[in-house]
Image (spheres, grey):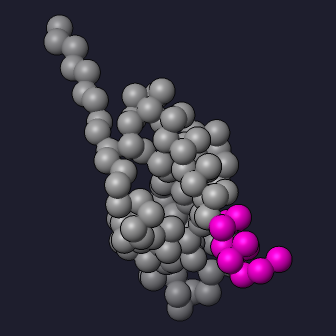
Amino acid sequence: MTVLNTFLKEYNTRVQKVQFNLREYETLGFPGCVFSTDGVHIGWHNCPSTWRSIFAGKEKVPTIAYNVTANHRRFIHGVSAGHPGTRNDKTISWFDDLIQSVRNDPFYKNLQFKLIHKIKLL
């Protein structure tokens, strides 16, 4: 298989995944959404005492934080490197390669996200 064929196969697979996610999120009322992402903190029980202040966040327990990106069907598309538990989700997302590619990759430039608000007054 040539390099071009490999590239085209990976590109077509990527296009299919994104189109599938777009359709599914649009059905749920989130047109233009491709992935869902959130920060996940995993407890670090054997954290060295010298590092405790760096890894112990608001819960006062040392954790390692990851940014996990998945679709609505819980298929994980990407996980960032581990970060100290004191970092918040927004800071971790700046270091996540998948989120940065969605922000900067021309592949995603034509997608527009439009959130539909439904406010019910009492």
Is 82 colored magenta in this rendering?
Answer: no
Q: Is the magenta region chiefly helix, strand or loop?
A: helix
Residue at the image position 49 percent from the left and 59 percent from the top: 39
- Vertical order, 22 against 52 (above or below): above
Left-right relation of 119 to 49:
left
Q: Residue furthest bottom?
A: 50
Picture coordinates of residue 57, whole percent (x, y): 43, 68
Vertical relation: 113 (above or below) 97? above
Instruction: From the viewer's perspective, tell me whether residue 42 is left or right of residue 59.
Output: right
The image shows a total of numbered marks equal to 0
Percent x, y of residue 58: 40, 63
Q: Quadrant of the C terminus?
A: top left
Which residue is pictured at 49% across the width and 41% down the height?
A: 22
Foreground pick, 48 / 116: 116
User: Percent position (x, y) of residue 67?
Assistant: 52, 64
Q: Which residue is situated farthest in the right direction here?
A: 1
- Is residue 97 visible in this depiction of the protein? yes
The image quarter containing residue 59 is bottom left
Q: Quadrant of residue 88?
A: bottom left
Q: From this viewpoint, is residue 85 visible? A: no
Q: Which residue in the rendered view is the most extreme toward the left?
A: 121
62 or 90: which is nearer to us? 90
Above or below residue 50? Residue 42 is: above
Q: Quadrant of the N terminus?
A: bottom right
Please provide the residue range marked out in magenta.
1-10
* Residue at x 45% of width, y 82% of height: 54
